[in-house]
Image (tube, rainbow, N blue to C red):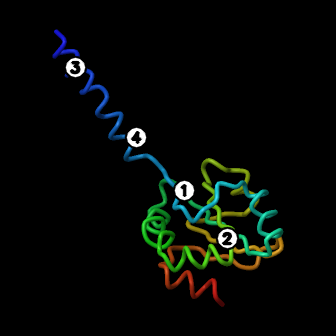
Amino acid sequence: MKKTNLVLLVIFLLPIVVLGIFFAREEPQVFSALSLVEAKAKAVEQDKILLVDATADWCQPCKAMERTTWVDPEVIAWINLNAIAIQVDVDRQREEAKELNIQAMPTIIVFKDGRELDRAVGYKNASELLAWLNR
């Protein structure tokens, strides 16, 4: 009887664990957990730019950037030196997405002193992102 219960427990829990791993969303470490308001204030306080990455769980180009661009050592070094970076999930943070006028993902927005300087829409690899940021 105990063996049957163990088998049933494994059969029940395995799909939950697998789905949890599959759907788990972990931000790349380059992004701060600050809110948009907090990040704007911190960027001004530290005389850095604010880099906002508008994303969504279902956005495949966004996921590609999370696996490649946002974990690239040169991108991380540039952001650590020059910026405060946050992600805004357009589905979970609807008010922020509306405030930022997000129309497509990924959208990357650069702010300086609380004012928007530029934005880019679409996938950027590490070298494209760094070239855009260094203009």
The image quadrant where one finds the C terminus is: bottom right
Instruction: Report the quarter where the N terminus lies.
Output: top left
Q: Amino acid at mark 2?
A: Leu
Q: In the image, which disc is placed on residue 34?
A: none
Which numbered marker is on residue 51?
2
Q: Are marks 3 and 1 in contact (CB under 8 Å)?
A: no
Say what amino acid the circle numbered 3 marks: Leu
| Sooner in the amino-acid sequence: mark 3 or mark 2 | 3
Label 1 Cα neighbours within 10 Å, binned few <14 / some 14-19 / many ≥20: many
Q: Above or below — where is 131 with respect to 45?
A: below
* Label 4 SS: helix
Q: CA distance from mark 2 to mark 1?
A: 16 Å
31 or 104, nearer to the observer? 31
Name the residue beneath numbered marker 4.
Answer: 20
* Residue 112 coordinates in the image, percent (x, y): 79, 76
Residue matched to label 1: 56
